[in-house]
Amino acid sequence: MHLDAQVINKIIHSVKDNQGIDLVKLSDQRPTLLFFLRHFGCTFCREALSDLSEIRTEIAALNVQLVFVHMVDKETADMHLSFYELNKSVNISDPEKQLYEYFGLKKGNIRQLYGLNVMMRGFKAGLLNGHGHGFTSIGDMNQMPGLFMLHHQKIIRSFLHDTAADKPDYLEFIALALENKA
């Protein structure tokens, strides 16, 4: 996926994280993994947060900055991220979904959100693996998630979910992105 450089520059200069740092500075400091959440009640987002929490030390050892993009206020995000010991993580509140739009993340269709494989994976992740399901008022239940690795203001790797249930191997994604930047 290739976005217009002027559009990316405009967005990454204007969007600031929960510590007041813009994406330009973040991506210039070190490779930055942007993880776009659907909503904090999403079973698959909860699973991803749990997975990322478990490997956060490995991610940091690779000198990669993990940044969560969500649609709620800082306090609500911190509360939900604290369940996964990620409340001190860098995150960006994007209630108008500008970043989602500029990175090409769209609303999902029925198959992407409620298809048979989504329901089966949701049952496994939510009920069997204990990630549950929460309120959709803390995000947009129709929004598709995504992963992007930025470095020096460029997207060096992306993962656009085909369904809400897609689960990339995060460490493999990072390793491939870091290979691309070399």
Image (cartoon, grey):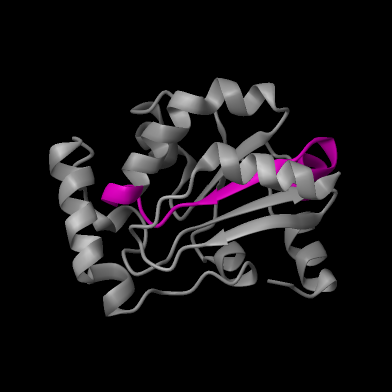
Residue at the image point whose x is 59% and y is 67% from the top: 98
Q: Position of residue 43 (x, y in %)?
A: 26, 48
Image position of 161 with respect to 54: above or below: below
Q: Position of residue 154 (x, y in %)?
A: 80, 57
The C terminus appears in which quarter of the rendering?
Answer: top right
Residue 54 higher or lower than 4, as above or below? above
Query: Residue at horizontal 83%, vertical 70%?
Result: 5
Would residue 20 be visible to someone looking at this image?
A: yes
In this picture, residue 168 sits left or right of residue 115: right
Q: Number of labelled discs?
A: 0
Report the span colored magenta: 23-44
Q: Is residue 36 magenta?
A: yes
Residue found 61% across the figure and 29% down from its top: 59
Residue toward you, 80 or 148: 148
Q: Position of residue 65 (x, y in %)?
A: 67, 34
Instruction: Check the image and report above or below for 145 versus 107.
Output: above
The residue lying at 61 percent from left, 48 percent from top is 34
User: Could you tell me residue 52's position as x and y percent?
Assistant: 47, 33
Q: Quadrant of the N terminus?
A: bottom right
Quarter occupied by residue 91: top right
Res 136 → quadrant: bottom left
Going by the image, does 60 lie left or right of 46?
right
Relative to 128, say whether 56 is above or below. above
Is 28 a magenta residue?
yes
